[in-house]
């Protein structure tokens, strides 16, 4: 009987450990996915290009909302590793069956609305926010068609709630059921480094 008690305790401990490892694996995978998307976006924004003389170049942010969640849209021309020349790139958060999905479109700069299908980057996001800094003020919208110049910096924030993120209480009793990765990006082309 003592052996059965010890074996039951060991089996219970094993099951709890197995559940914890599975939960962490999902969280780590989501974090890695977020970080990869943010790294790609940062590199593309650092390489963004605008010229007042060219009607093909653009940098535009749009402040959007999807059922109370920030769902910004960012369109810009940039040098990309995917295409040999300058590309028109759009990042947007769209509602898909009640859940926000971060999507990306990439195409030639001379087409205003490329017919390529949007690539699904991350599903189940909480929000996607873009802000630009100009004259020491953070703005939610920007359009080079009106301003004729690029902003000083761009702040990108991506929030994920639940779905693979630890939904318990963290240190000091704070909820840990959402995670925000935010990055301030400085444009490099045409700037002194």
Image (tube, helix red, strand yellow):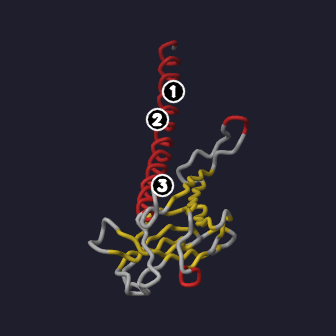
| SS category of the residue bearing label 2 | helix
Reading the image, the residue beneath label 2 is 18
How many numbered badges does the structure rendering display? Answer: 3
Spot occupied by residue 41 in the image (x, y as percentages of width and height): 45, 62
* Residue closer to the observer: 102 or 108: 108
* Residue closer to the observer: 73 or 134: 134
**Could one spot residue 96 in this view of the protein?**
no
Residue lying at 42% horizontally and 72% vertically, measured from the top left: 49
Question: Against 26, is 84 above or below?
Answer: below
Residue lying at 44% horizontally and 71% vertically, measured from the top left: 104
Q: Earlier in the sequence, mark 2 or mark 3?
A: 2
Marks 1,2: beta carbons within 8 A = no
**Could one spot residue 72 in this view of the protein?**
yes
| SS category of the residue bearing label 3 | helix
Q: Earlier in the sequence, mark 1 or mark 2?
A: 1
Reading the image, the residue beneath label 3 is 34
Reading the image, the residue beneath label 1 is 13
Q: Which of labels 1 and 3 is toward the front?
A: 3
């Amino acid at each position: 009987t003592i052996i059965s008690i010890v074996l039951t305790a060991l089996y219970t401990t094993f099951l709890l450990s197995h559940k914890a490892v599975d939960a962490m694996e999902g969280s780590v995978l989501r974090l890695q996915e977020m970080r990869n998307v943010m790294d790609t976006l940062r590199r593309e924004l650092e390489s963004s290009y605008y010229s007042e003389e060219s009607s093909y170049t653009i940098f535009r942010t749009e402040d959007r909302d999807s059922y109370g969640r920030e769902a910004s849209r960012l369109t810009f021309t940039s040098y990309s590793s995917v295409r040999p020349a300058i590309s028109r790139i759009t990042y947007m958060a769209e509602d898909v069956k009640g859940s926000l999905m971060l999507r990306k479109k990439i195409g030639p700069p001379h087409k205003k609305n490329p017919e390529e299908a949007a690539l699904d980057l991350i599903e189940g996001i909480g929000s996607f926010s873009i802000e630009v800094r100009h004259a020491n003020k953070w703005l939610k919208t920007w359009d080079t068609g009106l301003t004729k110049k690029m902003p000083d910096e761009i702040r990108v924030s991506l929030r994920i709630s639940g779905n693979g993120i630890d939904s318990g209480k963290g240190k000091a009793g704070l909820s840990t059921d959402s995670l925000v990765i935010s990055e301030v990006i400085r444009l490099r082309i045409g700037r002194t480094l």
